[in-house]
Amino acid sequence: MSTFQKTLEKLNLLFLSKKAKQKIEQIILILAIASFIVHLLFIFFAELVPFLNHDSPLLGSPIAAVYTPFSFILVYEVYLLVYYLPRSITTYVSKQYEIISLIIIRRLFKDLANLKLSSDWFSIKGDLQFTYDILASLILFYLLFWFYRLNRNRKSLNTNNYIKDIHLGRFVQFKKTIAVILVPLLLSMVLFSFGNWGYLELTDTSHSLKELVNINNIFFDGFFSVLIIVDVLLLLVSFFYTDKYHKVIRNSGFVISTILIRLSFSVDGLVNTILIVFAVLFGLAILAIHNKYELNFEVEKIKNQN
């Protein structure tokens, strides 16, 4: 085993082992509970703290306090995405879909605290966005159910022998390298993005945060930009190990799906919701057609053996 491989295995054990996963899960859970309590205290005693931005929508109602622990849950989902990257590309993509659906759920908690109940519901931008997100969360939940079901069916076909064992080992090692690099990179992005946003959100009395398109996009627009780069790298490297048409289309389709999710952060309103739902629907359709190809190859294989 080379020095690089030994270093890679050590870093993998440090960041991506089951033991590391359990520790990170416990830390995130403790931080989520603590942040929820702290957020509630800020809301109840906001008037007594002069440096707080009292116009912040996150200080308007106790319901908004759920927004903060949900942010930590999302960070854990980001870690899980990296954790599953070396194990399965399809599971890795499903984690992307989980993250974007949880972003919408988190957005619902924030908007729920600032709803304006009136007969003019469909003329109020905030209430209209809440309606879009409620419907989108249900649709995404259902699409994810089918995505996991198709992924389970794909595994049951046992047709992953298109890569020789030696080549599969190299591809897994490449994915491990990418995952090990992603952990500190994304951690740095999380600390900087959420730390800077949290400070400005609580203390920014000049309202410079209004220049942001949507505070729900903090960190995650950059995060999905990184994922696009990773997805393209995986697509290009996969060409060394398979040239099967349906595999290439599946991997390419997943890249397109990630790009659509990233584009959703640049817009708001109905277009934002449509892009997210369509991105997941596109990925689901790609996987469904891919499975049909796999099943067809399996049938042909059985016929040839007979």
Image: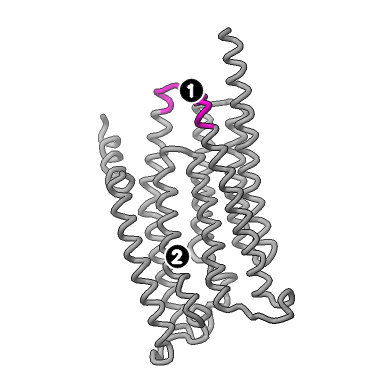
Q: Quadrant of residue 174?
A: top left
Q: Which amino acid does label 2 sit on?
A: Ser
Towards the viewer: 124 or 204: 124
Q: For mark 2, what is the residue?
A: 71
Question: As drawn, is 291 to the left or to the right of 230?
Answer: right
The residue to which callout 1 is attached is 161
Q: Is residue 243 left or right of residue 282?
A: left
Q: Is residue 271 above or below residue 67?
A: above
Tag 1 secondary structure = loop
Q: Are the residues at dot 2 and dot 1 in contact (C-beta closer than 8 Å)? A: no
Query: What residue sits 66% from the left and 64% below the top?
Result: 132
Depicted 75 relative to depicted 109: above or below: above
Percent coordinates x, y for residue 119 in the rendering:
73, 80
Work out whether 166 lies above or below 128. above
Residue 9's spot in the image, x, y percent? Answer: 28, 39
Q: How crowded is mark 2: few (under 14 residues within 10 Å), some or many (20 or more)?
A: some
Magenta-drawn stretch contains 161:
yes
Left or right: residue 18 compared with residue 106 = left
Q: Which residue is drawn at 59% across and 26% down?
A: 294
Sequence-wise, the earlier of marks 2 and 1 is 2
Q: How far apart are marks 2 and 1 (CA)?
A: 39 Å
Tell me what residue is drawn at x 63 percent, y 52 percent: 260
Kindly give the residue lying farthest to the top in the view shown: 306
**Image: magenta residue range:** 154-168
Please, which colouring scheme is shown? one colour
